[in-house]
Image (cartoon, grey):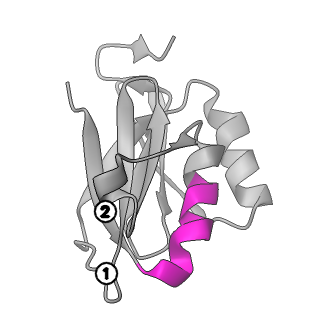
């Protein structure tokens, strides 16, 4: 199981990035005091996304991570209503999929179910 991912985000993009992840069901949590400056942490269940404040963030052009969105259609509509561009992707294993790009260029895949029909409970 992956505990967290860390992505670089320009300080000016942190608030908008937090908004994106909150729309995906993450909540902001306090990092340890030693990491409080220059980091923003978000958590959903046992998974965390750590935003690393970086003046010149680097995002791999094809790299991404996936988030389960059991209410897929509602999640896509919520993202669009908040001005995020959601790109539909080919359905796999019977589950709808899409990509949304976080501020800073990191791609996040959205899917209703993981391979094998494992929905988030």
Q: Nearer the viewer, residue 73 or 31?
A: 31
Regarding residue 92, the answer to whether it shows in the image is no
Checking the image for residue 7, the label placed there is 2
Tell me where residue 9 appears, x and y as whole percent: 40, 73
User: 15 or 87: which is nearer to us?
Assistant: 15
Q: Is residue 105 magenta?
A: no
Would you identify the image quadrant in which residue 63 lies? bottom left
Q: Residue 79: horizontal and vertical position, in percent?
A: 68, 53
Q: Main secondary structure of the magenta part?
A: helix
Residue 82 in the figure: left or right of residue 40 = right
Quarter of the picture containing the N terminus is top left
Whether 11 is drawn above or below 50: the answer is below
SS at mark 1 in the image: loop
Q: Quick check: marks 1 and 2 in contact, CB under 8 Å?
A: yes
Side of 71 relative to 45 (left or right): right
Specify whether 113 is left or right of 17: left
Identify the disc placed on residue 57.
1
């Amino acid at each position: 199981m992956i505990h967290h991912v860390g992505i670089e985000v320009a300080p000016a993009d942190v608030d908008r990035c937090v908004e994106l992840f909150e729309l995906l069901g993450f909540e902001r949590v306090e990092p340890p005091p030693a990491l409080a400056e220059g980091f923003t942490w978000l958590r959903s269940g046992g998974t965390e996304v750590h935003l690393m404040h970086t003046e010149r963030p680097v995002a791999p052009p094809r790299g991404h991570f996936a988030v389960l969105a059991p209410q897929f259609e509602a999640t896509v509509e919520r993202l669009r209503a908040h001005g995020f561009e959601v790109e539909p992707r080919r359905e796999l294993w019977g589950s709808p999929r899409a990509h949304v790009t976080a501020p800073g260029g990191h791609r996040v895949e959205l899917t209703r179910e993981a391979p094998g029909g494992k929905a988030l409970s």
